[in-house]
Image: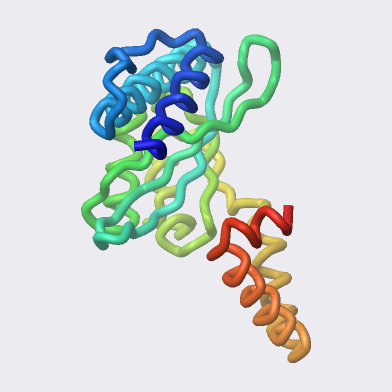
Amino acid sequence: ASHFKAEIELIEDSAKDMHCEMLPDGSNRNKDECKKIMLELRKHLHGKLLKKLKEARVITVSIDESTDVSTKEMLVVYLTFVDESGEACVEHFKLVRMFGTDAGSIYTTLKSLLEEQGLWKKTVAHGSDGASAMTGLKNGVGAKMRADLTWILALHCINQKPALGANDAANLVAFSSEMDKLFRGIGRLVRKSAKRLERLA
């Protein structure tokens, strides 16, 4: 009970910070009520994001495919845009279910999602992990998008390129592999204990 009370209080504080109406009434402090309030907050935040996106002149899309614990294929979608103050914003837009991880399935899922919100024609660039399904010259997601949106740029994620290069370089040095195992072991040890996490902080 105390756990859910703390959750509700955190949610109520978040709602006040965002000037979001608390629906349903948070006085029923139980798990189901907590879930309903979280869904209301999500709806409120998503609505605010959609308003900003519709005001933006153009957007760029960053995507990656994943599989959840129930082995369902999911597409993670991030959108980048410039808001009314001229600030660049990167926002998680949606985690959407797919039926296949081939280029055709990814393209169809992404296009349907963005068209539904009137954002498809605003898309000017697409970023991905560089896998062949994403960047293939003829049948990749980028190529399929370019067939519809002739102006679009298809890019390999600039953050992932150095990570891949560093990983390849590290594999050539045995000491790096041992250090990696050590740090991962420390991470696993610390994550399993709230007390250790607190001490680390």
For image coordinates 62% across by 27% down, the residue present is: 89
Residue 116 visible from this viewpoint: no
Please tell me in which quadrant of the rendered image residue 81 appears: top right
For image coordinates 51% across by 12% down, the residue present is: 16
- Judging depth in this view, the residue of 39 and 3 nearest the camera is 3
* Residue 3 pos. (x, y %): 40, 39
- Judging depth in this view, the residue of 89 and 54 nearest the camera is 89
Question: Relative to residue 5, is residue 109 depicted above or below?
Answer: below
Please tell me in which quadrant of the rendered image residue 136 appears: bottom left
- Judging depth in this view, the residue of 190 and 28 nearest the camera is 28
> Quick one: which residue is furthest to the front in this view?
2
Residue 46 visible from this viewpoint: yes
> Quick one: which residue is furthest to the bottom in this view?
174
Q: How is the image coloured?
A: rainbow
For image coordinates 48% across by 56% down, the residue present is: 135
Q: Quadrant of the N terminus?
A: top left
Q: Is residue 173 left or right of residue 53?
A: right
For image coordinates 35% across by 39% down, the residue present is: 110
* Residue 57 pos. (x, y %): 55, 16
Please tell me in which quadrant of the rendered image residue 44 appears: top left
- Judging depth in this view, the residue of 41 and 174 nearest the camera is 41
**How many numbered marks have been drawn onto this rendered protein structure?**
0
